[in-house]
Image (cartoon, rainbow, N blue to C red):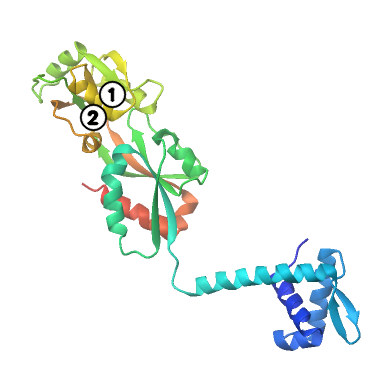
Amino acid sequence: MRWTLDQLRTLVAVAEHGTMSGAAVTLGYTTGAVSQQMAALARAVGRPLFLRDGARLALSDDGVVLVEQARLVLEAEARAASVLRGPSAASAVRLGVFGSAAVVGLPATRARLTGDPAVALQAVEVDVEAMPDAVLRDEIDLALGLDYSDAPLPPRRGLDVARLHREGFLLVLPPGAKLDAGSAEEVRAFADETDWILPPPSSTFGRAVRTACARAGIAPRERHLVTDTAVSIALAEAGLGITLVTPLMLAMRATTAPTVALPGPSTRDVVALTRTAALDRTGVRAVRSALVEAFTF
């Protein structure tokens, strides 16, 4: 069954006036135009909508049902039109976030959007590895993601990737370790002789860490496999080995343990992930702009 809002509006008018001529006057149509619309609507329904009652038209049983539903549809259409005629409604924007990036970026992003009536920001925690798929499935409107120089994000059709912040890697050392921060050779020698706390190699971070170590000329002696950043740092503080972090990770979970830069060129980018089509939405563009500003430091 296919019908139009005009046909439903005309149906309600005919039902209220009892004549097509009366409906025509109310709607500003000709009587012939009203008759054609009702004939088309009856064909779409496949059943008679009116019964002749002398000079007037009475609704059939199916006509009564359709008029009741038509009024609901027309009321909803009128409400939608009223909202759109007023000031722009706030656009609900779902932002996928994860640990360290959320702690650093979300408050600053929210602050930059304060006072913007066009955006209603909702943070949604998502596994960082699942961010691209969540964006492409429209489960979230945009997301904070990670792109490692040693394990880059594969290009995805319809996915826009914008770099927000680049950072290097740091080694969290066991308590009491004293290294010359400028001596890469001393760092390599110490790292090769000490146990390591690493993320599983099946994760993107795990692969990136191992490649970064290889680029730095370090062969980590893997002792503990830990995914959670806070736990990894706590184990390093307890003297169980070295772990690899970034400045943003330390902003989420600070440490009193000694740290030193990992030698080599490896980096990690915090990125904004968005469906290309979603960039046409005012709210999504506003949130992404706020993210760019929040991560400019």
Which label is found at residue 212?
A: 1
Q: Residues within 10 Å of mark 2 (few under 14, many from 20)?
A: many
Mark 2 — residue?
Answer: 169
Tell me: 55 left or right of 93: right
Q: Is residue 87 depicted above or below 237 in this figure?
A: below
Q: How many marks?
A: 2
Q: Position of residue 24 (x, y in %)?
A: 76, 85
Q: Amino acid at mark 2?
A: Phe
Camera-side residue: 262 or 237? Answer: 237
Q: Is residue 125 depicted above or below 45 in this figure?
A: above
Query: Upstream in the sequence, badge 2 or badge 1?
Result: 2
Q: Residues within 10 Å of mark 1 (few under 14, many from 20)?
A: many
Tell me: 242 left or right of 15: left
For residue 136, say whether it is visible: yes
Q: Amino acid at mark 1?
A: Ala
Split into 4 quadrants, where in the image is the N terminus?
Answer: bottom right
Camera-side residue: 22 or 118? Answer: 22
Under circle 1, the secondary element is helix
Tell me: 1 left or right of 165: right
Q: Position of residue 64 (x, y in %)?
A: 79, 71
Name the residue at 19% across, 16% down: 191
Name the residue at 14% across, 21% down: 184
Which label is found at residue 88?
A: none
Q: Position of residue 290 (x, y in %)?
A: 31, 54
Name the residue at 8% across, 22% down: 180
Cβ atoms under marks 2 and 1 closer than 8 Å? yes
Q: Position of residue 78 (x, y in %)?
A: 59, 73
Under circle 2, the secondary element is loop
